[in-house]
Image (cartoon, rainbow, N blue to C red):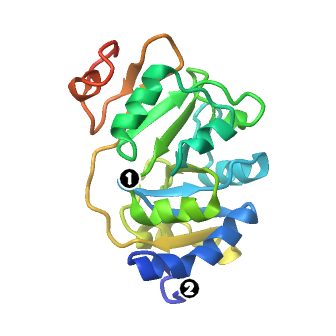
Amino acid sequence: MRHDALTVPFWSPVEVESALREALAHLSARRVLAYPTETVYGFGTAVDHESVEALVRLKGRPPGKPFLLLINDPAQIARLGLIMHTYASDLAARFWPGPLTLVLPGGDQRVSARLRGPEGGVAVRWTPHPGLQRLLAAYGDPITSTSANRPGVPPAMTAEEIVSQWPEAIHSGLLHVLDGGRLAPSRSSTVVDCTGRRPRVIRPGVLTAVQLRECVPGLVGDT
């Protein structure tokens, strides 16, 4: 770790490989990891109850506001008992990895209630960020994800912003920060509810309804 900035370099392939062992150990210890994504910096943990609660406490997350899951392999969805209807599989085949978040039903016995949204589903995205993909491949399971910021503060675009907002958590060893440099401004992922008979856009984002309907004509909602 760079003691001056309290972060670990996570930019080049060599840096990513060097950072893996400590990052994986941190996840296994049920602590919180900060990392770059294709949009903003995120906080994440393992998906077990104790890990998710550590993230809830760090963020001060109110009940009813869930986290999403990041994956690098659709097989991880099946292992959690989440269900992909045919149209969800079609969307995933066309747009994953990429800026599309799918809210999936199922996982009743394997997924923390903290990860379940008002639609009753669990939000999942296959991230296209290469460093994060490598981390997920090495870990072998999904990790949770939420924006790395205090309430009312814009999501962090640099690791330094996280250090300035969360010094106590870093010094205590709860928070481990992977530094992927300054991220370029980007729109959020498009979120599609896949818990019903037809897919429904519940948050506009990078992908438009026109693009999505080329794959699933029955899509409800617009961007």
For the C terminus, the image quarter is: top left
Q: Earlier in the sequence, mark 1 or mark 2?
A: 2
- Comparing 38 with 3, the one in front is 38
Q: Which residue is mark 2?
A: 1
Crowd rating for badge 2 (residues with CA inside 10 Å; few <14, some 14–19, many 20+): few
Q: Is residue 53 visible?
A: yes
Cα separation between marks 1 and 2: 26 Å
Q: Is residue 6 visible?
A: no
In the depicted structure, whether residue 72 falls above or below residue 160: above
Locate residue 162, reporting x and y percent. 48, 67
Left or right relative to 122: residue 112: right
In the depicted structure, whether residue 46 falls above or below residue 94: below
Tag 1 near tag 2, CB within 8 Å? no
Q: Residue at x 38, y 52 (%)?
A: 154
Amino acid beneath label 2: Met
Left or right relative to 213: residue 87: right
Left or right relative to 45: residue 130: left
- Comparing 209 with 30, the one in front is 209
**Residue 160 figure quarter:** bottom left
Crowd rating for badge 1 (residues with CA inside 10 Å; few <14, some 14–19, many 20+): few
